């Protein structure tokens, strides 16, 4: 449990660019605060180009494949987390299938969670529509039911906050560019029995096969991930 508290409190500082390593925008793996940096081409890197907060942000390619940072926990029954995202004017298809990018997921990997046939307890997927950028949220109930909500994003900094609490009924809340704790944009009491937070992955966990139809070599921007067990974070864009 100490690892969970220490890792995530430090991470919120480093991704905001206030850590000494990220002041020079070094590779995220050098910071040592995430348990794993996924190997592969087109790495996730810290950049001082268009930082959302502080000196640096996490630049994530939209190309195919997986590239993410990960933090491990152990059967957390209550978690609140926030992150910032900027679509960064990415030029992706605006209609049809296979055009989403999974940018963050909270995973449950225990045996109890495997009964529903998946490990993603919560995930966020970014896409572009004719009327702008959208972020879809998907939460999985204990019986396999998928809850989905979609919200419009700015083509700039956006702050997302999520609360997940295991139980039946459980607690599921989401705030989109909203720092008022008492007025969440999503507020549900699903069947989250035996659902736990075991790891979080942020970056690019998967993309649709048509993602580079219009352009290649583009990036989205992620920043300021912070996680707590109980208290509302209330983060906002500068």
Image (spheres, rainbow, N blue to C red):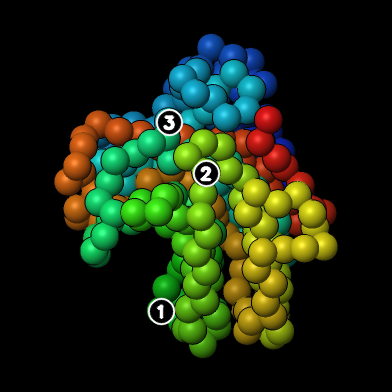
Image-quadrant location for residue 118 = bottom left
Residue 79 placement: quadrant: bottom right
Instruction: Give how far across and how far down residue 9 sits, in percent.
Output: 71, 38
* Residue farthest toward the front in the current orientation of the protein: 131
**Of callouts 2 and 3, the N-terminal one:** 3
- Residue 176's label in the rendered image is none
Mark 2 in CB contact with mark 1 (< 8 angstroms): no
The residue where tag 3 is placed is 59
Question: Spatial distance from mark 2 to mark 1, Cα to Cα?
Answer: 34 Å
- Compared with 185, 85 (above or below) is above
Would you say residue 29 is visible in this rendering?
Answer: no
Look at the numbered disc 2 and give the secondary structure of its residue.
loop
For the C terminus, the image quarter is: top right
Q: Earlier in the sequence, mark 2 or mark 1?
A: 1
CB of mark 3 within 8 Å of CB of mark 1?
A: no
Q: Taking 160 as reference, is 182 left or right? A: right
Determine which residue is flagged by label 1.
117
The structure residue drawn at horizontal position 55% and vertical position 46%, both measured from the top left corner, is 71
Disc 3 is placed on an element classified as strand
Q: Residues within 10 Å of mark 3 (few under 14, many from 20)?
A: many
How far apart marks 2 and 3 lie (CA) works out to: 17 Å
Identify the residue shown where x is 34% and y is 54%.
Answer: 130
Q: Nearer the viewer, mark 2 or mark 3?
A: 2
Measured as percent of width and height from the top left, residue 84 is found at 58, 41
């Amino acid at each position: 449990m100490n690892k969970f508290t220490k890792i995530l409190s430090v991470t919120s500082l480093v991704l905001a660019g206030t850590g000494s390593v990220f002041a020079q925008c070094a590779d995220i793996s050098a910071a040592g605060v995430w348990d794993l940096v996924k190997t592969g081409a087109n790495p996730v890197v810290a950049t001082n180009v268009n930082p959302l907060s502080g000196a640096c942000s996490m630049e994530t390619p939209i190309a195919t494949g997986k590239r993410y940072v990960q933090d491990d926990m152990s059967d957390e029954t209550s978690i609140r987390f926030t992150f910032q995202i900027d679509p960064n004017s990415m030029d992706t298809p605006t209609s049809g299938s296979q055009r989403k990018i999974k940018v963050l997921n909270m995973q449950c990997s225990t045996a109890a969670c495997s009964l529903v046939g998946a490990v993603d307890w919560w995930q966020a997927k970014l896409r572009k529509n004719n009327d702008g950028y959208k972020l879809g949220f998907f939460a999985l109930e204990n019986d396999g039911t998928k809850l989905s909500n979609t919200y419009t994003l700015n083509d700039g900094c956006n702050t997302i906050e999520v609360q997940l609490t295991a139980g039946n009924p459980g607690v599921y809340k989401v705030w989109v560019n909203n720092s008022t704790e008492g007025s969440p944009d999503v507020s549900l009491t699903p069947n989250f029995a035996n659902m736990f937070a075991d790891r979080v992955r942020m970056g690019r966990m998967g993309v649709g096969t048509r993602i580079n139809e219009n352009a290649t070599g583009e990036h989205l921007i992620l920043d300021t991930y912070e996680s707590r067990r109980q208290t509302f974070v209330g983060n906002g864009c500068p």
